[in-house]
Image (cartoon, rainbow, N blue to C red):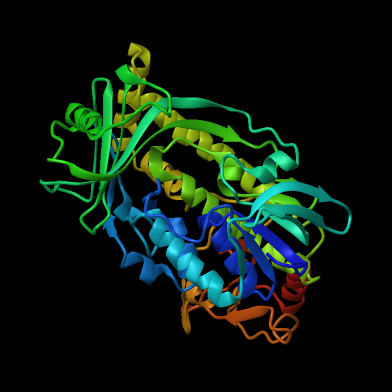
Amino acid sequence: MNGTPTPRPVIVVGSGPTGLLLAGDLASAGVPVTLVEKRPRRISNLSRAFGVHARTLEQFDARGLADELLATGDTITGLRLFRRLSLDLSTLPSRFPFLLITPQYEVERLLERRAREAGVEFAYESEVVGLRQDDEGVDLDVRGPDGAVLTRRAAYVVGADGHRSAVREAIGLDFPGVSVIKSLILADVRLAEKPEGVLTVNGRGDAFAMIASFGDGWYRVMGWNRRNEVSDDAPLDLEEVKEITRRALGTDYGMHDARWLSRFHSDERQAPHYRVGRVFLAGDAAHIHSPAGGQGMNTGLQDAANLSWKLAAEVQGRAPEGLLDSYEAERHPVGRAVLRSSGGLVRLARARNPLLRAARALVSAFVGIAPPAQRKALAQITGIGHAYPAPRGAHPLTGTRVPDVALRDGRLYEALRGGRFVLITPGAYEGPGVREGRLTVEHWATDRRTTLLVRPDGYAAWAAEDADTTAVEKALARHLG
């Protein structure tokens, strides 16, 4: 950072998965964007997240990255939450009816490459130390690698800088919540004995452990011991990891050669707002959850997919009124729902009270035998069931996730790779939106009569049965601006 930085319409702070996806989307849409990152340039192989759910894979598919990401890991079709409760992911109504087990660094690697190819400017070893905003933009004070503080000017700033977000602190937002697990251990190890599956999970007595294969000979171990809940900075050695694993799983699989050992505590927290003026929060800067269900990274990536196209439309002067406000209106309730579901799973898993143990048994039995309950649980954990508010009287599809439907020429998520709205219509349409390059027109592979307008993030903006050209043009004017 030498001299005076060039003003950018958008500055994204934080180069984790959320920030990388958001910055890459903006740059792909033609918006100049700078990504500010406190750490040096590197993708660490020591990361907590390891599971990519179906809805996130659909978003990667819409960016042409899903198949490449799938090649980096293994998939599982059964997700066990308690000893007697497992969910059958193979029933998901998605092109990706499974959980992909792959380390977070593989996700980051693909998203960073895409962001660079799209023209994102990266500013590493650069720390946010101040922020001011006015009606025209945001001034971001950034300390660079040489220690000098320079002010970067942007129309909008997005804080995707994690649970200790400097951006969130700078705009004065609290981060209320509680600790749900006081002491978790993490380790990356090698094993002398290979577990039966890609993911091994169990709890026994006061211990819980999970082992996930990275597919390259390394395994991620996560666990807790209720009888030894200590502070994050307490020493951790491989023997303690082995002990917890033996207590929970009956064996430590001959673990050896730990390349990483860490303790952390798991909080449930959510910012009261995701937008303050021209500043937005996304990912862990906006919400953090327990690790149950593996929803944290996935929820942040969905935040980015929701916000990116809206910011691009605003910066390029084509956003309908209120579009940016819809980010918080749509994503804050989702973050709250994930807090409830992941926190509830942890509390049931750790239950010591006889009433809670009975509740866990009841939940396990009910979800295990009742298809509607299992579908609802699957939809929540995988993200495919989240829907956004729709106006009164709107078509039932409005606000819902649109699956990867077959089109006359391909499929929907291939059509979404242009980053534009997609109009699926039974008839011809060549009106406003098409000529300006802001709309892709596709046709059903069947004789379906529904006209469906799909947002760039794969949710239904508007739908109607047997709509005429006037109705279509009114809908496009309302949603494309």
Q: Quadrant of the N terminus?
A: bottom right
The single residue placed furthest to the top in the displayed view is 354
In the rendered image, the vertical position of residue 358 relative to residue 199, given as above or below:
above
Left or right of 16? Residue 184 is left
Q: Quadrant of the C terminus?
A: bottom right
Of 359 and 300, the residue lying toward us: 300
At horizontal 46% and vertical 57% (from top left) the residue drawn is 55
In the rendered image, the vertical position of residue 267 relative to residue 13, given as above or below:
above
In the rendered image, the vertical position of residue 182 relative to residue 24, given as above or below:
above
Of 411 and 148, the residue lying toward us: 148
Left or right of 75? Residue 469 is right
The quadrant in which residue 249 appears is top left
Q: Position of residue 313 (x, y in %)?
A: 73, 68
Of 136 and 307, the residue lying toward us: 136
Q: Position of residue 90 (x, y in %)?
A: 30, 55
Of 7 and 334, the residue lying toward us: 7
The single residue placed furthest to the front in the displayed view is 146
At horizontal 75% and vertical 42% (from top left) the residue drawn is 171
Q: Position of residue 13 (x, y in %)?
A: 64, 54
The single residue placed furthest to the right in the displayed view is 135
At horizontal 67% and vertical 67% (from top left) the residue drawn is 33
Q: Is residue 391 visible?
A: no
At horizontal 74% and vertical 51% (from top left) the residue drawn is 279
The quadrant in which residue 287 appears is top right
Q: Is residue 155 visible?
A: yes
